[in-house]
Amino acid sequence: MAGEGAAERAAGKEAEHVIAKAVEQAGVRDAEQLTAREAERVAARETERSGGQAIKDGWSSRVADNGQGIVHQRPGATGNSDAVRVMNPTSRYPDGYVRYYNGRGQPIGLDGKPGSRAHTHIPRNPDGSCPVPKDW
């Protein structure tokens, strides 16, 4: 357990470093000001990396509530419905992971069906790209 805590702290420090670097590059005071401007830039990068398949045209982007990634969502959708969460690296997912949500707000796996956390946390590829669920 102690090792897991250290790994999580290290991942958290890495995320803080990434956010600080993004704040610096964007020329804003803090991460709260970063959200709108940087989220759009990150969305463009993620769309490019995924081949444009994971994040659909016209979707809005914002920093995840926990500050550890970006959420892309269909305009007008509420809760988790019709969304893609692209999360930062963690000790379990060193390249980060993606979680897709259907129109009912249920997380889905690559088979397009709702499932457990293990089934729906989809590891990102080392180049930042991500697999896309069936019929996405």
Image (cartoon, helix red, strand yellow):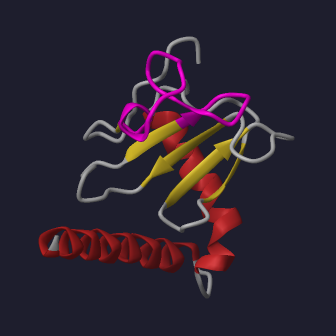
Q: Where is residue 104 in the image (x, y as percent from the top left)?
A: 72, 31
Which residue is at a point 39% across and 31% down the rendered structure image?
119
Q: Which residue lies furthest to the left in this view?
A: 3
Range of residues picked out in magenta: 100-122
Q: Where is residue 76 in the image (x, y as percent from the top left)?
A: 87, 41
Which residue is at a point 53% across and 77% down the rendered structure image?
23
Asked if 40 appears above or below 77 in the picture, the reply is below
Q: Where is residue 93 in the image (x, y as percent from the top left)?
A: 28, 49
Whether residue 107 is in magenta: the answer is yes
Q: Is residue 75 left or right of residue 54?
A: right
Q: Is residue 70 left or right of residue 131?
A: right
Q: Which residue lies furthest to the top in this view?
A: 135
Which residue is at a point 54% across and 67% down the rendered structure image?
66
Q: In this view, does 4 lie to the left or right of 83?
A: left
Whether residue 44 is in magenta: the answer is no
Which residue is at a point 81% across and 40% down the rendered structure image?
77
Q: Looking at the rendering, in which quadrant would you find the N terminus?
A: bottom left
Q: Position of residue 109 (x, y in %)?
A: 46, 26
Q: Looking at the rendering, in which quadrant would you find the C terminus?
A: top right
Camera-nearest residue between 25 and 61: 61
Asked if 98 appears above or below 69 in the picture, the reply is above
Asked if 63 appears above or below 94 in the picture, the reply is below
Camera-nearest residue between 111 and 35: 111
Camera-nearest residue between 8 and 73: 8
The chief SS type of the magenta part is loop
